Amino acid sequence: MRITRVVSTALLLAGLAATPAAADSSPSASPSDDSAAPTQAGTSFRTATEVDQGRQATASGSAGDYLYWSFAADAGQRPTVKATVKLPDTHAGETWQLDVYDGLRRRQACQYGAATRTAAQDATSLDLACTLRTVRAWSETWANDPLPGTYYVRLTVVDLASSDLGKPVSTEVRVDSKDIGGSAAVDGSLAQPLTPGIAAKSASDDGSSSSTSAALSSIEPDGGWSSGWWSDRWVWTGVGGVLAALAGIGGYALTRGSGRPRRVPPPGM
């Protein structure tokens, strides 16, 4: 009975600990209302249109334009960027490319997804996708790991016939993230997210002299940026310590026996 109670307690604790981990691995909630989503795109990094995760941004442009959007990604998230290009009725074969850059404007590699695709002459639309690596809370200075902060999406055509240059196209872009949880946690965190300046503004102190400063991006994840030190690894570490203690108690109970054997004489005899 004693061993049964020990095993039952261990299984109960393991089940309780698995609950938050399962919640962390589910995709992040996506707003269903796209009425506030942007309907235009920027033409450079500095004019990139900010879009919240879970909303579908749309934009119209011409073949040959560079279209830019920006979004915020926090530690523990694995963002997936999807883009749809609606092509004109008549066109030659053309190749489109989807690029994602971090707050330092370093191009991030796609873990999987077709970020470059060629549309046939009779194609009416083209779908592109890029799933980034999991955003880390901290990284070495020499590494190119994704870090918390602003990310830029650039959509453009890289192979186009001269006869199709300037033809109207419409695009749709959506960003969603999956929360990976403590399995991607690292020991350390950034002092500030990578949110570089998006515009320059002038401020005059006394009317005679003026100073110019950069305005930081106002976009951030729902609920603000994470602190960077807490993850469900702490839960699993605590549960592991409890299970180890229970295993020690159970081993002691199995090997201790019922006391001194009856045939062994007491000490001193």
Image: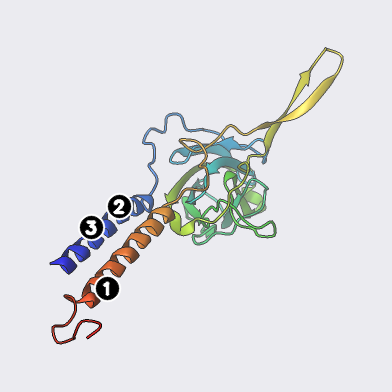
Q: Secondary structure at mark 3?
A: helix
The quarter of the displayed image where residue 28 is located: top left
Residue that badge 3 annotates: 12
Closer to us: mark 2 or mark 3? 3
Closer to us: mark 1 or mark 2? 1
Q: Tell me what residue is drawn at x 31 percent, y 56 percent.
A: 18
Q: Secondary structure at mark 1?
A: helix
The quarter of the displayed image where residue 54 is located: top left
Q: Tell me what residue is drawn at x 30 percent, y 52 percent.
A: 19
Separation (CA) of disc 1 from disc 2: 28 Å
- Are the residues at dot 1 and dot 2 in contact (C-beta closer than 8 Å)? no
Say the numbered circle drawn on residue 17. none
Disc 1 marks which amino acid? Answer: Gly
Disc 2 marks which amino acid? Answer: Thr
Separation (CA) of disc 2 from disc 3: 11 Å
Give the position of the N terminus as an image quadrant: bottom left
The coloring applied to the image is rainbow
Q: Is residue 2 above or below residue 50?
A: below
Expressed as whole percent of the image width and height from the top left, the position of residue 73 reads 53, 45
For this view, does 195 lie left or right of residue 2? right
Instruction: Return the disc, 1 or 3, that comes first in the chain's sequence.
Output: 3
Residue that badge 1 annotates: 251
Residue that badge 2 annotates: 19
